[in-house]
Amino acid sequence: MRWIASIGNKFFRVVPGETLLIICSTLVSQVSLLLAFLLPLKIVILLGSTGMPRYFPDAFSLVDRDFLVVILSFSTVFFYVLYLLSEKLVDIYARRGALALLKRSHKIALFENDEDVASRNYQRYSRSLATIVFISLIVLALSYLYFEISLFLFLYSILAFVLIILLNSHNEKIHNSLAESPGRVIGVFASVGFLLSFFFMVGHFLLGQPPSLLAAIISVILIRQGCSRVASLVNDIKALSAQKYKLNALFFHGHILVKEARKHEVSFWSLLKSPKCESWLREVLQETLSEKIHKLKSSWVQLGGQDIIALHIKSYNVENRKIADHLLKLFNSNKSSLARHEATLLSECSELPSMPLIRVVEVEGFHCHIYHWVPSEKILKEKVKLARLKILSSLILIDPGIALISQYKRSHPVLWHRLDENMMDRICTVAEKGKSEDLEKIKLLSRRRQDVVQRLKKLPLVIINPDQGPDDFLEARGGKVITINWSRWSLEPVGAGWSTQPSQAKRLRVSFTKAKSERRGLEKVRFEDVYLAALVYSFEKSYVRHDFLSAIKLVPRILKYLEGESDVSEASSRECEEGKNENYIHGGME
């Protein structure tokens, strides 16, 4: 609350006029909206009555009923228009005040849309102040119109406040809810308060000496408005606090933008600290072993991605004899979808060049994968390119299976789905700024897009694992290459993911020729179609990276393979078919 007060002090010192105007405009807006909803109720009551209802103000009885209906109808429109104008004024002065604050802080651009963030939060703060004033006015109005109900709500508020403190201290679920979304919890208590106040009002009318019916109706509307405003006030304060570091950097001259450690990041990395780390490691690993773990030794395994912990863990019994070797991967909460994606593949395909997945568990809400450790070493950087080719060659041999293909297609678009009209239209737009012959070829490809799609659909699907870094590759005994990162795997037409350099095409031909003899379903597939898939995949990846010139350069080659022609030399083709260059991929790592 001290920070809320300090930032409010900043606003009133630098832009007092704009802040007061926003508060006043917000109050006018809220009152106008309230009247715009209240007056139609009175009009309906008048229309349903033969005369003037006795609980209406005495001044109304001096006016003709029909004329009063017209006046109230025009008043409803007036107050609603006043509400819209007030909201527009709030937007105008919020942007003006935010710009003045930014100018006063003498900062360069700090992040994307910093002016919008400043304007939105300045407006939110001013609205919060207006809401406090509005709730205060509601309390005063209730005290005047219906003192008994205001006293009841005061006692309920004290009781709810004490109950929230007790629940926050003793109930972990409520504590987490208050920390993550306090407005929702307060909103529940506010709704219960409204319901109880309604029952109190009914009982008072039946058993006590209630005020006039009109005062009761107005009180119900005021209570409902007040309860909703309390919840929105809490949400606004929570939203402002969540932007604390950004707002400090934007509005305060002496503050710089620092990254706030989020709650899930703190709890995630705290799992590595001793003795907590050994405790949960022992618990999750013991389930995979029949012999009791006496001691653990863990070492860090470097992965290419962020927010994923990988550990090589050795388990020892009481006799200090090693009983198990495991690879354990722990995914942060922002990587939970990648964790599920990886587990889906590894649980369906046991033939992958990977460490076998043993178990999938959760550790304090974070996804955890446990693998059987395969003795292996990191691959030298100069051998990573060859290792990647070996992985691609081994994946061509693996049939993903009908179940995995069906599941994947229901969840993700395949290459031919992503080759849409929007892509072709954007590349045509770029090509218009270049050579005319390039534009003509792209237009031809756009016209023949369905031919490409049909060719791709006929190809069997293969698992590919893009976006792998050098740290993801390991060399097991016997020279077998495995990878320990499968979080971004996909299914694409066979050939996708391979290099499209003409000099590298023979490597794909070698692997494809070998796969035709070992994998069912590839016997009748032509190499020209496989290489077409490689070209289209590379074309789509260049488009996604906005490397439009590289994509345009691939168009002539795609058209050639679409016509059944080849830009791979016949000599290279014969050489590969005879298997003379098989050492490119299927040979050793030396």
Image: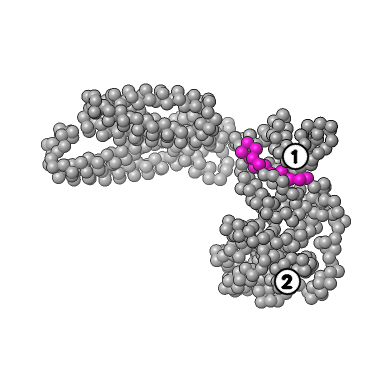
- Dominant secondary structure, magenta: strand
Picture coordinates of residue 533, whole percent (x, y): 67, 67
Query: Which residue is depicted at the point 76% across and 54% down?
Result: 353
Q: Quadrant of residue 461?
A: bottom right
Q: Where residue 421 sits in the image (x, y, percent)?
A: 55, 66
Looking at the image, is 70 positioned above or below residue 255? below
Please tell me which residue lies in front, 443 or 349. 349
Q: Which mark is in front, 1 or 2?
A: 1
Residue 250 image-quadrant placement: top right
Residue that appears at 59% across and 35% down: 263
The residue indicated by pointer 1 is 289
Q: Residue furthest right?
A: 590
Q: Quadrant of residue 224?
A: top left
User: Is 226 left or right of 333, judged from the image as shown?
Assistant: left
Residue 193 percent location from the top left of the image:
37, 30
- Horizontally, residue 589 falls left or right of residue 147, namely right
- Viewer can see residue 399: yes
Which residue is labeled 2 in the image? 523
Q: Callout 2, which amino acid?
A: Glu
Placement of the C terminus among the 4 image quadrants: bottom right
| Position in image of residue 391 (x %, y %) | 76, 57
163 w.r.t. 353: above or below: above
In the current view of this chain or complex, which residue is farthest to the front?
290
Asked which secondary structure carries label 2, the reply is: loop
Q: Residues within 10 Å of mark 1 (few under 14, many from 20)?
A: few
Q: Quick one: SS at disc 1?
A: loop
Q: Residue at x 63, y 48 (%)?
A: 340
- Give, as a single range, the part of the protein colored magenta: 361-373
